[in-house]
Amino acid sequence: MKKLSFQTLLKYNWIFYLLTILAALAMRRFSRITDSDALLWILAPTTRWAGILGGIPFEYLPHMGYVNHYYRFLIAPSCAGIRFMMITFLMLIFSFIHRFSSNRAKAFWFGSSAVFSYLSTIFVNGIRIALAIYLPIPLEKAGLLTSLLNPDRLHTLIGTVVYFSALCVFYPLASCLCQYLFALLSNKCADSFSSASESESKLLIPAFWYLLAVLVIPFAGRMIRNDWDGFIPYALLISGACIIILAVSRLIRRLLSPHA
């Protein structure tokens, strides 16, 4: 597929980019809400899915979230996964919408990306919550929860592994779907996306969007506030987990496709 200049991308896609940024800002605002009543649209289905996966019930506490008293686990507003939904939506729009020629096709991709970001957040976040409930139990019994890997860092690690792995899966799937839709709508044979550069971007682009939201923007905020308490271990943990996931993903791709 022919590469487009930055000016061309803006000329034909600026309205979708603007709407995406506004939607991301709205999601960013939602991520700061501390009253669970305003987040039931995502907390409720996420909790039901996590409950199915974990086989445990949750009770709703107004303004606080969903709690399981036996495991002493609270699904609070901060567990809603709004940031992951924002990252997924940004990645899908900025990576693919310019590949469609008509505004109707672009609008279809925009709406489909919004729906997919919401549904995938519920699906992935439910898995993360189930792991966050059950994984610490055997680790604690085995004495693996120490000052180096305390419960807070384990919680962060689980979220990073689940969310970033999901993005690394979503991007190539979206690329294949975009390729198919492009061919279908243009009545042409789809271009090949199996070049070496595209293969590498299938790993690097999810990393860019995830690290931008999880590390770069928080880094800028801490610079403004001059608050570095706990940030360095947090950044090292997330960076290390992402590097390992990228290495494993690249190895798997090479094993499955020698020409990738």
Image: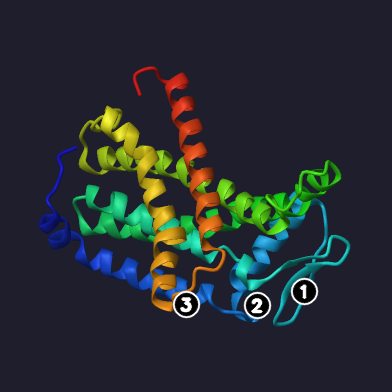
| Quadrant (top left/top right/bottom left/bottom right) for the N terminus | top left
Work out whether 227 lies above or below 192. Answer: below
First in sequence: mark 1 or mark 3? 3
State the CA–CA distance, disc 1 to disc 3: 23 Å
Work out whether 77 lies above or below 160. Answer: below
| Residue identifier under label 2 | 36
Q: Nearer the viewer, residue 213 or 230?
A: 230
Other residues around mark 2 within 10 Å, as few (<14) / some (14–19) / many (≥20): many
- The location of residue 5, given as percent across then percent down, is 12, 51
Q: Residue at x 56, y 79 (%)?
A: 33
Kindly identify the amino acid type of the residue bearing the numbered disc 2: Ser
Q: Nearer the viewer, residue 189 or 79?
A: 79
**Dot in front, 1 or 3:** 3
Could you tell me if the residues under marks 2 and 1 are in contact, i.e. CB atoms within 8 Å? yes
Work out whether 83 lies above or below 77. Answer: above
- The location of residue 37, given as percent across then percent down, is 65, 80
Q: Residue furthest top?
A: 258
Kindly identify the amino acid type of the residue bearing the numbered disc 3: Arg
Q: Residue at x 33, y 34 (%)?
A: 200
* Picture mark count: 3
- The location of residue 105, given as percent across then percent down, is 27, 54
| Residue identifier under label 3 | 29
